[in-house]
Image: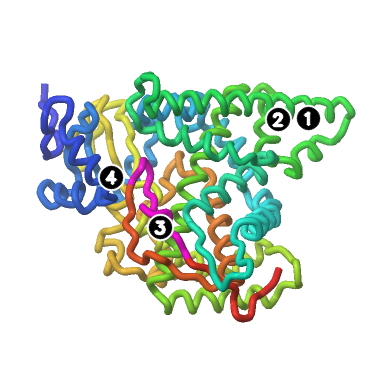
Amino acid sequence: MKRKKLPPGEMGLPWLGETMDFFNAQRRNRLFEDFVDPRIRKHGKIFKTRLMGSATVVVNGSEANKFILSNEFKLVKSSWPSSSVQLMGKESIMEKDREGHRCLRGVISTSFGYNGLETIVPKICDVVQNHIARNWHIGGQDDQIVHLYHSTKVLTFKIVFECLLGMEVEEEMVDTFERVLEGVFCPPLMIPGSKFWRAKKARREIEKMLVNVVREKRREIEEERRLKKKKEEEEDGNNGMLLCKLVCGMIEGEISEEEVVDNVVLLVFAAHDTTSFAIAMTFKMLAQHQDCYTKLLQEHGDIRKSKRLGENLTMEDIKKMKYTWQVARESMRLFPPIFGSFRKAITDIHYEGFTIPKGWKVLWTAYGTHYNEEYFKDALKFKPSRFEEAIPSYVFVPFGGGPRLCAGYQLAKLNILIFVHYVVTQFEWSLIHPHEPIIMDPLPLPSLGMPIKISPLTQPQKY
């Protein structure tokens, strides 16, 4: 039998492999510089290693991204740590394959089509403005300090719950979800007092709360149907657009109650830290590039002048924020909210003259294209203008790609653009620590919470 030609690379110590090098680089937010790039230089774009006990092949480049991500369910399947699966839920879409994934994604995606997004824009505007009014107090002082990253984490949490689920957010809910997040990449050991133990306890609290909400929503919808109200009225999005669709799917027998709960939990986490980090990095880059900020201010000033007092933004206004989206995309290119993700080979994979054996893990990374001069000239420089032209598929991948492309990426876009608009049209602001380090715990975040100093605009544009 012909021997398999494995990719080059070093497997390191038994079981441990190069895990410590990987984690140390990730913790410093230097995964590409300290782990991936040195191995690319030594072995090429595809190399083998051993991470967390698993033989792993790391692939880099747009062709590799396309090959792996577009062959989901055919050659590879999603591969998350046991702790992540237990905390996000085994019935969440991240664990579903083939038909189960297609069905769930279909239900979820309908909320993020154009009509659904158009409905949700004024709701997001209201949540953002209320959040700023309550938490960004100027008072009698000339300025004040706001911790931008924490503030936007609370905000994105509110947007998911109030706009998509029709649920009021209580203060302790944010802390409970945070405790769950702390355990998603920890060893799944139920030792009292450990991060994973605390995360499981928090997950049970969340599940109990959500089960009650889901059952109450089901009773409401079934009562409406008994009263012979139109189905369109049940699902018009006026009281929790996505939750209504999920519960209607449950009533129709398409999905289970457990699937509804698990996917609500996953949605909160998918939209929570990643979006707030993207917002924080957008402001970081604007603070360091005044010419870009001046251009962005002009765009939002023009939009603001076209609005009546108290009038919310619309999808047409969002479409005008072209330069702002270029800035946000360039910020996500340099600071991707996720570094990549693992897959597991479900058959022997033949790629680039090598064999990736069945059962091995495959890791693709955003850095493999985002920092590559082949795709982005002067890759380490901040140049929003590079997004004036279309970017080839699988090159810019902050939201993944293929069948598992993030279903809520358009919601993230709305959150970023709307928040930027209301901040820059009301406040002067500056970073207190312009070169604040980025760390991983377990996702990337500004190490000091990105405090900013704010003061009212000399000529504030009131809403």
Horizontally, is 278 left or right of 423 in the view? left
The amino acid pointed to by label 2 is Cys
Q: Is residue 97 visible?
A: no
From the viewer's perspective, tell me whether residue 428 is left or right of residue 34: right
Find disc 1 in the rendering and name its residue.
221
Residue lying at 22% horizontally and 43% vertically, measured from the top left: 24
- Please provide the residue range marked out in magenta: 440-452
Structural distance between the alpha carbons of marks 4 and 3: 18 Å
Quadrant in which the N terminus appears: top left
- Number of the label disc, if any, that sits on residue 332: 3
Q: Label 3 amino acid?
A: Met
**First-in-chain label (3 vs 2):** 2
First of labels 3, 1 by sequence position:
1
Given residues 341 and 122, the one toward you in this image is 122
Checking the image for residue 248, the label placed there is: 2
Q: Amino acid at mark 1?
A: Ile
Report the mark closest to the observer, 4 or 1: 4
For discs 2 and 1, the disc positioned in front in the rendered view:
1
Crowd band around label 3 with a 10 angstrom C-alpha radius: few (<14), some (14–19), many (20+): many
Q: Which element is circle 1 on?
A: helix
| Quarter of the view holding residue 217 | top right
